[in-house]
Amino acid sequence: MSQKQFTQRSISVLFLLVLTASGTGLLRAATKSSLPSRYAVWLNQEVPYIITNAERSAFIDLKTDADREAFIQNFWAIRNPDSNSPTNEFRDEYYRRLAYANDQFGSPGRHDGWRTDRGMVYITLGPPQQLTPYRASQYLTPLEIWFYQSPSPNHALPPYFYVVFYQRSLNEDYKLYSPFLDKPERLVQSTNAVNDEAMALKIIKEDLGAEVARISLTLLPNEPASVDSPSLESETLLNRIRNYRNLPENVELLDERRAMHESVSHRIVLGQSFSDLSAMATRDGDALASISYLFQLFNPQDFFVAQGEDGRFYYNVEVEAALKNGNGQVIFRDTQKMMNYLTAADVAERRQRRFALEGRLPASPGAYTLELTVTNQVTHQAFTQSRNVVVPPFDSQLNLSTPMLLTLDKPNADPGDSLPFTLAGVQFAPLGGDNASVPHGSPVRVMYQLWDKAPSSASPAQGSLDVVYTLGQLGRPEKQQTTQSVDKRGFDHFGNLLIGKDLATDELSPGPYRLVIQVTDPTGGAHVSQAINLTITSARPPLWTVVSPSFHHRNDPLDAFRRGQCALGQHDRALAVYYLRQSIAAGYPQKQAYTALAVAYREAGNVAAAEDAERQADNSLGPVRHD
């Protein structure tokens, strides 16, 4: 913006800013009374200097926390200079400025520096190119002079200007100085310059030099300065800084980025021929169950990483997991974003590998369909897959899980039991389930979990189970059989037993095979079996795996709430009540949990308990939770 253009805007901008300032109190008052506290803090204390008036009004009008969270996510997304980057540089820099302002300005220990004039300018424009403090002047108030050079990429502000702050007394914070409204007299402590701007200017010049005296008359280096002609352009500059978020240039830029963000948010959804999904249900302890899944692409070239403007490589993936009951109704959805930087060596190595993603979801006994959508945010390609999964009842007789084939990698310890494919504190590396490919010559390493009624001191587990593994090709009589005896004393006190077995493939020719696992209890005659298809073939590119943080520690309130949702979806009201009460005790937002609990009680016919839960829901706001 030229100096002439800037001057022409002075009167209109001043008028606009008077109107804007007059409505600020009304906006804040409405916000305070209608928004949950966490969102009121975000609106009024975290982003007041960058949220436009239109955005503020739209945010205040939102009715649900879900809509508010979506608004906040989009708010930062349209301000991100690189929408595909693992980090949002704008947001990170903004919160760095906010933290600095709260730490360096304002009342010590109160973290209210954002409210001060220095805080407002620092948060809005960032650190100045030069900062010169004048705190020991004999006749002048303490001063700070900040010099900025091209802080606005869209020329909403002049290319060069000063910002001056002054402190009238030690009990006051530094105030923004206006040559037009304050005049040089405000900078002089003595009474020698009262109503005498020429004398004030002379004192400033003798005390701090001609340059500071000139700055007291105008904040613009190229503007002619005169004590008889106060700088209206300087006041316009200050008001444009105060209202920086609403300047037409900035609003137009945001509108362009918003339109761009919406245009690239559409995904290209690819069919199931590009990928595979394997899922395995496990019982994890006392009335605990989960579903671990492995998503993998078939070819390394189907997944791309990006390189940012700073030269760093990164990936950016979003996974949406929906768990449905047998009627096709969605019980809950889990959305996670995984972003990280890679070195050049990492990129070169991963180009030889196939992308894979592991995740784990809480569940309760019942039949489910797991639907997965994995989106590469770099290319906006989405891969979809689904798989049916059955979680057995906790009091079931002898049964076994869906088998999972493993890589030959060494398992890792997971004492928190929070990672996918973790059993008994050990995390295994999955190769795949049905239709997995095993390198010719490598053993088929299979893992599964046996389930039985929990043993008791009165009826301890005794004897052994007979296991037969049959590996053969359809239509051919030749079969490879391997037997195994399993000591029933290996079952834990919840009735779970992890089994692993290596099956040799040296004498098998490449091709498709079917593995059947049969388990028999000779004592009671119980017999169960599971089967999966696999292919013995030449070695495929190995996997490079990203883990979704969708599962948490054993006592996590969200996981307990989701188990309660699962039990409701499976019409197991007693188990739903158990999980939902567990989630409330662990700290899950009580309004949501009590509302679901009321549904469980009503479906069970316990009207009194349902009405009590509904009253609890009405009286509970609960904390805002981000997942």
Image (cartoon, rainbow, N blue to C red):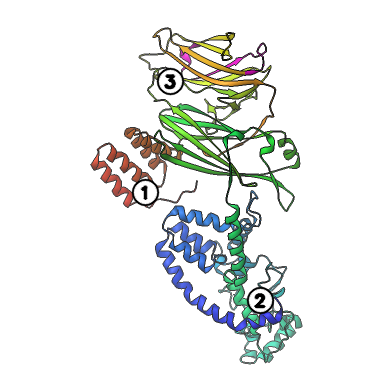
Looking at numbered disc 2 in the image, what kind of residue is underneath it?
Val
Q: Is residue 302 left or right of residue 522?
A: right
- Of residues 288 and 470, which is closer to you in this image? 470
Q: What element carries label 1?
A: helix
Q: Which of marks 2 and 1 is in front?
A: 1
At a point 47% along the width and 16% down the height, the residue shown is 529
Q: Nearer the viewer, mark 3 or mark 2?
A: 3
**Of callouts 2 and 1, which one flags the residue occurring earlier in the amino acid sequence?**
2
- Of residues 65 and 186, which is closer to you in this image? 65
Q: In this view, does 596 lie to the left or right of 492?
A: left
Q: Where 248 sits versus 496, above or below? A: below
Q: Where is residue 591 in the image (x, y as percent from the top left)?
A: 37, 48
The crowd level at tag 1 (other Cα within 10 Å; few <14, some 14-19, many 20+) is many
Q: Which mark is residue 495?
A: 3
Q: Which residue lies under the disc numbered 1? A: 591
Q: Residue 164 carries which label?
A: 2
The Cα atoms of the two marked residues, 3 and 2, are separated by 74 Å
Q: Quarter-wise, where is residue 276 in the image?
A: top right
Magenta residues span 486-511
The Cα atoms of the two marked residues, 3 and 1, are separated by 35 Å
**Of callouts 3 and 2, which one flags the residue occurring earlier in the amino acid sequence?**
2
